[in-house]
Protein backbone atom coordinates (compact mmCIF):
# COMPACT_ATOMS: atom_id res chain seq x y z
CA UNK A 1 0.00 0.00 0.00
CA UNK A 2 1.13 3.58 -0.71
CA UNK A 3 0.00 6.93 0.60
CA UNK A 4 0.07 10.28 -1.23
CA UNK A 5 1.90 12.98 0.73
CA UNK A 6 3.05 16.53 0.06
CA UNK A 7 6.53 16.31 -1.49
CA UNK A 8 7.32 19.93 -2.42
CA UNK A 9 5.80 23.32 -1.62
CA UNK A 10 6.58 26.90 -2.58
CA UNK A 11 4.39 29.18 -0.47
CA UNK A 12 3.53 32.82 -1.23
CA UNK A 13 5.21 32.94 -4.66
CA UNK A 14 4.37 36.23 -6.39
CA UNK A 15 3.30 36.02 -10.03
CA UNK A 16 5.80 38.02 -12.10
CA UNK A 17 4.01 37.66 -15.44
CA UNK A 18 1.37 35.88 -17.47
CA UNK A 19 1.39 34.89 -21.13
CA UNK A 20 -1.75 33.41 -22.68
CA UNK A 21 0.07 32.82 -25.98
CA UNK A 22 2.78 30.61 -24.45
CA UNK A 23 2.40 26.83 -24.13
CA UNK A 24 0.54 25.95 -20.93
CA UNK A 25 2.62 25.55 -17.79
CA UNK A 26 4.01 27.49 -14.85
CA UNK A 27 7.52 28.88 -15.22
CA UNK A 28 9.43 28.72 -11.93
CA UNK A 29 12.96 30.08 -11.40
CA UNK A 30 15.24 27.03 -11.56
CA UNK A 31 16.89 27.66 -8.18
CA UNK A 32 13.52 27.86 -6.41
CA UNK A 33 12.32 24.65 -8.08
CA UNK A 34 15.59 22.93 -7.17
CA UNK A 35 15.34 23.92 -3.50
CA UNK A 36 12.09 21.97 -3.14
CA UNK A 37 12.92 19.16 -5.56
CA UNK A 38 10.59 20.13 -8.43
CA UNK A 39 11.58 18.73 -11.82
CA UNK A 40 10.86 20.01 -15.32
CA UNK A 41 7.43 18.81 -16.54
CA UNK A 42 6.44 17.63 -13.06
CA UNK A 43 2.72 17.82 -12.36
CA UNK A 44 1.84 20.51 -9.81
CA UNK A 45 -1.24 21.78 -8.01
CA UNK A 46 -1.37 25.57 -7.71
CA UNK A 47 -3.57 27.61 -5.38
CA UNK A 48 -4.10 31.33 -5.99
CA UNK A 49 -4.35 33.11 -2.64
CA UNK A 50 -6.16 36.09 -4.24
CA UNK A 51 -9.32 34.20 -5.13
CA UNK A 52 -8.91 30.67 -3.85
CA UNK A 53 -8.82 29.04 -7.30
CA UNK A 54 -6.82 25.84 -7.67
CA UNK A 55 -5.50 24.41 -10.91
CA UNK A 56 -3.13 21.73 -12.16
CA UNK A 57 -0.33 22.27 -14.63
CA UNK A 58 3.34 21.34 -14.97
CA UNK A 59 6.73 22.93 -14.24
CA UNK A 60 8.89 24.75 -16.78
CA UNK A 61 12.21 26.02 -15.42
CA UNK A 62 13.01 29.73 -15.70
CA UNK A 63 16.33 31.50 -15.37
CA UNK A 64 18.15 30.71 -12.15
CA UNK A 65 18.18 33.62 -9.73
CA UNK A 66 15.48 35.52 -11.66
CA UNK A 67 12.63 34.97 -9.19
CA UNK A 68 10.34 34.31 -12.15
CA UNK A 69 6.90 32.80 -11.49
CA UNK A 70 4.95 33.05 -14.74
CA UNK A 71 1.51 31.72 -15.67
CA UNK A 72 1.51 30.39 -19.24
CA UNK A 73 -1.21 29.37 -21.68
CA UNK A 74 -4.61 28.64 -20.13
CA UNK A 75 -3.17 29.06 -16.63
CA UNK A 76 -2.65 32.76 -17.42
CA UNK A 77 -6.42 33.09 -16.94
CA UNK A 78 -6.06 31.82 -13.34
CA UNK A 79 -4.18 34.83 -12.02
CA UNK A 80 -2.40 38.07 -12.75
CA UNK A 81 0.90 39.76 -12.02
CA UNK A 82 1.20 40.36 -8.28
CA UNK A 83 -1.07 37.48 -7.20
CA UNK A 84 0.43 35.15 -4.61
CA UNK A 85 0.45 31.41 -5.23
CA UNK A 86 1.02 28.21 -3.31
CA UNK A 87 2.71 25.64 -5.58
CA UNK A 88 2.55 21.99 -4.48
CA UNK A 89 3.67 18.59 -5.74
CA UNK A 90 2.79 15.25 -4.19
CA UNK A 91 4.49 11.86 -4.15
CA UNK A 92 3.61 8.25 -3.45
CA UNK A 93 5.27 6.72 -0.39
CA UNK A 94 5.12 3.29 1.17
CA UNK A 95 4.44 3.00 4.91
CA UNK A 96 8.12 3.01 5.86
CA UNK A 97 8.94 6.05 3.70
CA UNK A 98 5.80 7.88 4.87
CA UNK A 99 6.75 7.41 8.54
CA UNK A 100 9.92 9.48 8.09
CA UNK A 101 8.94 11.76 5.20
CA UNK A 102 9.32 15.54 5.52
CA UNK A 103 8.22 17.73 2.61
CA UNK A 104 10.58 20.34 1.16
CA UNK A 105 8.96 23.74 1.85
CA UNK A 106 10.06 27.30 1.19
CA UNK A 107 8.19 30.56 1.87
CA UNK A 108 8.86 33.50 -0.41
CA UNK A 109 8.80 37.23 0.31
CA UNK A 110 9.35 40.38 -1.77
CA UNK A 111 11.03 39.70 -5.12
CA UNK A 112 10.35 35.98 -4.58
CA UNK A 113 13.33 35.78 -2.25
CA UNK A 114 13.33 32.87 0.21
CA UNK A 115 12.38 34.18 3.66
CA UNK A 116 11.77 30.87 5.41
CA UNK A 117 12.45 27.20 4.75
CA UNK A 118 11.93 23.86 6.41
CA UNK A 119 15.02 22.59 8.23
CA UNK A 120 17.46 20.97 5.82
CA UNK A 121 16.71 23.28 2.87
CA UNK A 122 19.68 25.46 2.04
CA UNK A 123 18.93 28.51 -0.11
CA UNK A 124 21.88 28.74 -2.47
CA UNK A 125 21.46 32.38 -3.46
CA UNK A 126 19.01 35.21 -3.38
CA UNK A 127 16.28 35.17 -5.99
CA UNK A 128 15.55 38.88 -5.84
CA UNK A 129 15.44 40.51 -9.25
CA UNK A 130 18.11 42.98 -10.25
CA UNK A 131 16.82 46.52 -10.61
CA UNK A 132 16.19 47.82 -14.11
CA UNK A 133 19.03 49.90 -15.61
CA UNK A 134 18.99 53.42 -14.19
CA UNK A 135 16.94 52.44 -11.13
CA UNK A 136 18.17 52.12 -7.59
CA UNK A 137 17.97 48.77 -5.81
CA UNK A 138 15.21 48.51 -3.18
CA UNK A 139 16.11 49.63 0.32
CA UNK A 140 16.08 46.76 2.82
Image (cartoon, grey):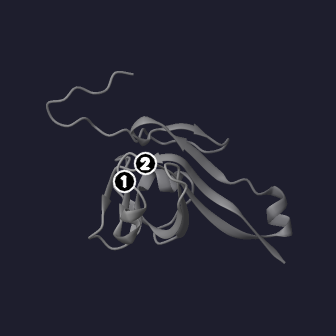
Q: CA distance from mark 2 to mark 1?
A: 6 Å
Q: Is residue 77 above or below residue 106?
A: below
In front: 65, or 106?
A: 106
Q: Position of residue 123 (x, y in %)?
A: 52, 41
Q: Nearer the viewer, residue 46 or 94?
A: 46
How many numbered circles does the render carry? 2
Q: Residue at x 47, y 51 (%)?
A: 32
Q: Residue at x 73, y 53 (%)?
A: 102
Image quadrant where residue 89 sits: bottom right
Mark 1, Cα crowd under 10 Å, few <14 / some 14-19 / many 20+, is: some
Q: Which mark is residue 80?
A: 1
x, y percentage for residue 92? Answer: 72, 71
Callout 1 secondary element: loop
**Residue that sits furthest to the top in the current view:** 139
Q: Quadrant of the C terminus?
A: top left
Q: Marks 1 and 2: in contact by CB < 8 Å?
A: yes
Task: Between residue 93 and residue 50, name the one nearer to us.
Answer: 50
Disc assigned to residue 51: none
Q: Residue furthest bottom?
A: 1
Choose top left, top right, bottom left or bottom right for residue 125. Answer: top left
Say which residue label 2 marks: 83
In which quadrant of the rendered view does residue 135 lie?
top left
Q: Quadrant of the N terminus?
A: bottom right
Looking at the image, the residue that sits furthest to the left is 134
Q: Residue at x 29, y 70 (%)?
A: 22
Residue pictured at 47% horizontal, 72% vertical: 41
Where residue 66 sits: x, y (%)?
34, 47
Q: Crowding at label 2, few (<14), some or many (≥20) Cα neighbours within 10 Å?
A: some
- Local secondary structure at mark 2: loop
Q: Is residue 42 above or below residue 69?
A: below
Q: Position of residue 53 (x, y in %)?
A: 53, 60
98 w.r.t. 51: above or below: below
Amino acid sequence: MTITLLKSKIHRATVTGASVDYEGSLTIAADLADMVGLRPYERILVGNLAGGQRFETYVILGAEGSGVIELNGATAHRGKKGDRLTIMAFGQFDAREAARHEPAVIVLGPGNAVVKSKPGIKPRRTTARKPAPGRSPPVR
